[in-house]
Amino acid sequence: MDITIVVPLFNEAESLPHLAEWIDRVLVPTGMSYEVIMVDDGSKDESWQVIEQLHAGNPAYKGVKFRRNYGKSAALNVGFGHASGDVVITMDADLQDSPDEVPELYRMIKEEGYDLVSGWKKKRYDSKIAKNIPSKFFNWTTRRLSGIKLHDFNCGLKAYRHDVVKSIEVYGEMHRYIPVIAKWAGFSKIGEKVVQHRKREYGVTKFGLDRFVNGYLDLMSIMFMSKFGKQPMHFFGLIGSLSFLLGFVAFVVVCVMRVVGSIHLTNSVWFYVSMLFIVLGMMLFLAGFLGELICRNSTTRNQYLIEKELCEQD
């Protein structure tokens, strides 16, 4: 299989037939083999019925339907699990991503040797206040923290070498940071391509301003895991040890002052401050380490209730 296109979607029944027609119009003349995996993230409209119709007309169109809405990261992760193409391309279902970009993205992966190519919607048709300005600030921050020189981390149109999608795990709302996750996993050849951005023709956007707040929290989580995920004691142990040491020194000072008779031990606020730092140090040292360890080894982090599938093996 040459290409797998993964399309996460939520309430996009109107746009799906047009997207499928557009994909076929672009890829059929190339002679490349392809499959399109549409992941219905718990839609409430007729999206799944449309996917079933597309599958009946062309087995290259496959589908996965979540029983409820889990989010874009979950949809992408499941789509990556089913992908069999040498190059895996993701795009949104709202027709704002152009399938005309697919052949060139495929070429950049196969011929130029990129592990990942991210789209850059240089000219956007979104609201400047609600999306453009916050998005620019968000991308600037991510570039500074990650060291990856991309202009548009959140662009849904991306291409991946097959090994990349099989080596990474996307959960929570981490889809914005797949390039960061890929770099962390050792896939460092990451490129960028200016892509066409189109106005939405059907439906409404599914993302609100809260995504930027959640995005920064996710970025902090990824940066922490990339630096301390394998050795969490380097973070928690350092802070916990400093806190414990500071509290212990303060406790010794308070005890010396008590011996020389200048204070009453239990009447001094510094006695309780020293105890606080000691306890806090121990909590950071133990609870933080155990909490991260439990989170990283959770067996249910990427389990989703899938109601139906149209992904039979050929």
Image: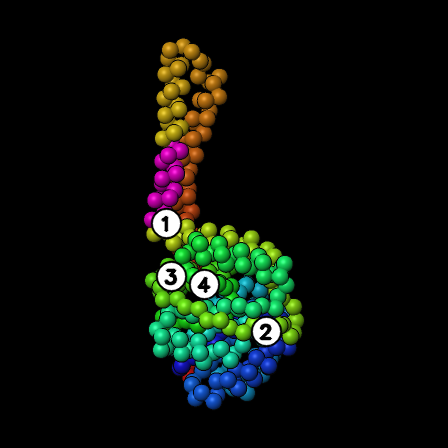
| Residue drawn at x 61%, y 77% as measured from the top left | 15
- Give me the disc on residue 198: 2
**Circle 4 Cα neighbour tier, 10 Å, few/some/many (<14 / 14–19 / ≥20):** many
Please tell me whether residue 46 belongs to the stretch shown in magenta.
no
Q: Distance between the residues labelled 1 and 4?
A: 24 Å
Nearer the N terminus, badge 1 or badge 2?
2
Give the percent coordinates (x, y) of residue 265.
44, 17
Give the percent coordinates (x, y) of residue 16.
59, 78
Answer yes or no: do the residues labelled 1 and 4 have beta carbons within 8 Å? no
Task: Name the kind of residue labelled 3 in the image.
Answer: Lys
Which residue position is annotated with label 1?
228
Q: In this view, does 32 lie above or below 273?
A: below
Q: How far apart are marks 1 and 2 (CA)?
A: 40 Å
Q: Distance between the residues labelled 2 and 4?
A: 20 Å
Left or right, residue 72 beside residue 46: left
Comparing marks 1 and 4, which lies closer to the viewer?
A: 4
Q: Is residue 10 above or below residue 49?
A: above
Which residue position is annotated with label 4?
150
| Residue drawn at x 42%, y 43% as measured from the top left | 288
Residue 45 seen from this side: no
Answer yes or no: do the residues labelled 2 and 4 have beta carbons within 8 Å? no
Which residue position is annotated with label 3?
183
